[in-house]
Image (tube, rainbow, N blue to C red):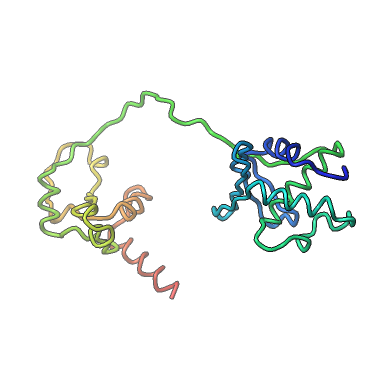
Amino acid sequence: MEKNIEIGRFLAFIKLFEGKQIFTLSSKSHFTLDLVDTDKKEIRFIMSTGKSNRMNRSDIESLLYTINENPHKEERYKTTQFKKGFNQSYFLALLKLYDKNEKGQKLKINEYKKFAEGKSKYVPVTIYERSKYARKECLKYYGYNCYVCDMNFENMYGEIGRKFIHVHHLIELSLIGKEYIVDPIKDLRPVCPNCHSMLHKTIPAMAVEDLQQLLNFNYFKRL
C-alpha cells in the first residue's frame, strides 16, 4: 500500500470503472460509478435505489488528505475518520479497489449486461379489422371509465387523458377468424390498457367479470 495517494492518479484509476456495478465494503448495497469527469473534477455515484450523489474535486482532496495524514493504517477504511456530508461508503469502496490494484491483486467487478435492440425484421401477421363506429357506440353507452377497475384517464392525467381508453372484444376476433356482426353494447367493453393486458394473459381471454373479482379479492386482501 502506498503511503500517499495522489489525486490525479486516483481519478485516472477510478475512471476505469465508469458504468460498472461496485459493492460497498459491507457488500450490503451497490452503486454504479456513472460519471467520472476529470475535466470538471467531479464524480457521481448512482445508488441501487436510483438516487445519486456527487463529489467534486475538493471533496475528494479532503478525503485523500485525511487518509494520507492518518498514521493508523487500520483506520484506512473507517468512515468515522471523515466529517459528515461525504459519500464515505462509496468512496471507500473505490479506495479499496485502488489499494488492491496497487498491490497487484485481481479486482472483482460486476458489470451490467448490455443487450442489442432495434434491429428490424420482417414478421408477417394477420390483422383483424375493427370498426371505429362500433367503438364509438360502445363508448357512447359505457363512457370512458375502465369497466374492470373504474379508472378514468382524464381524472388521473387531466386533459391529456381525455377520451383515452381501450375497447375490449368479449369474443376475440382472432378466435372467430372471419367477419361477423358486432353488437357494441353486448360484445364490447371499455377497459384501461393494464386491465386489457390482464384479460389477455389467458387464452382465450379471461371474462371481464372474473378479472373484476380477482381485482377486488386482491384489493381487500391487502387491507
Left/right of residue 48 with respect to residue 84 in the rendered view: left
Quarter of the image where one finds residue 21: top right
Residue under the point 26% across and 64% down: 150
Residue under the point 73% across and 52% down: 62
- How many numbered circles are shown? 0
Left/right of residue 149 with respect to residue 5 in the rendered view: left
Judge whether 38 appears above or below 68 on screen.
above
Which part of the image, by quadrant, shows the C terminus? bottom left
Residue under the point 71% across and 62% down: 83
Residue 116, percent from left and from top: 51, 30
Most foreground residue, 189 or 55: 55
Which part of the image, by quadrant, shows the N terminus? top right
Most foreground residue, 7 or 121: 7
Most foreground residue, 54 or 26: 54
Left/right of residue 59 with respect to residue 128 in the rendered view: right
Residue 172, percent from left and from top: 25, 45
Quarter of the image where one finds residue 195: bottom left
Residue under the point 60% across and 47% down: 44
**Residue at the farthest bottom position:** 223
Judge whether 20 appears above or below 69 on screen.
above
Most foreground residue, 196 or 71: 71
Residue 179, percent from left and from top: 15, 37
Judge whether 152 appears above or below 47 on screen.
below
